[in-house]
Amino acid sequence: MQTDDFVTALNKSEDLLWAAQPDELQDGLRILACQVAYARGHRACLPIDDVKEWLEAGRKDPTKRKIVTEGMERLIEVLTALGVESAKKTAI
């Protein structure tokens, strides 16, 4: 990646993050967290549609629940490290 490509990608991603709606960011973070957890255990990535299915099935399927739980735990760690405090859903 050239320096200009890096700067362009960085600026574009920042613009999109600022424009994204809270629910889009939440969905994206959940997907990313599950991908990280899955990749750590399997050295592979899941297609986005599969991750969405895992998130929905996680409450019922113990195998999927483990990955989803690990992903959410990593997400909690990152957000806590960034100083994000919990808020009640009704406050959002």
Image (cartoon, rainbow, N blue to C red):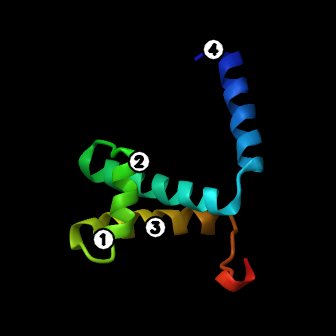
Gap in angstroms between the C-alphas marked 3 and 1: 10 Å
The answer to which quarter of the image holds residue 79 is bottom right
Residue at screen point 69% across, 62% down: 22
- Which residue in the structure is indicated by mark 1? 65
Q: Please state which of the two labelled residues, at mark 1 or mark 4, is closer to the viewer.
A: 1
Q: Amino acid at mark 3?
A: Met
Instruction: Name which of mark 2 and mark 3 comes first in the sequence.
Output: 2
Q: Please state which of the two labelled residues, at mark 2 or mark 1, is closer to the viewer.
A: 2
Gap in angstroms between the C-alphas marked 2 and 4: 28 Å
- Left or right: where does residue 5 sit relative to residue 60? right
The answer to which quarter of the image holds residue 44 is top left
Is the Cβ of the residue at disc 2 closer than 8 Å to that at disc 4?
Answer: no
Q: Amino acid at mark 4?
A: Gln
Gap in angstroms between the C-alphas marked 4 and 3: 34 Å
Label number found at residue 72:
3
> Which element is circle 3 on?
helix
Is the Cβ of the residue at disc 3 closer than 8 Å to that at disc 1?
Answer: no
Label number found at residue 48:
2
- Which residue in the structure is indicated by mark 4? 2
Q: Amino acid at mark 1?
A: Arg
Gap in angstroms between the C-alphas marked 2 and 3: 16 Å
Is the Cβ of the residue at disc 4 closer than 8 Å to that at disc 3?
Answer: no
- Residue 67 drawn at (x, y percent): 32, 63
Q: Would you call the spot at circle 1 few (<14 residues within 10 Å), some (14-19), or many (20 or more)?
A: some
Is the Cβ of the residue at disc 1 closer than 8 Å to that at disc 4?
Answer: no
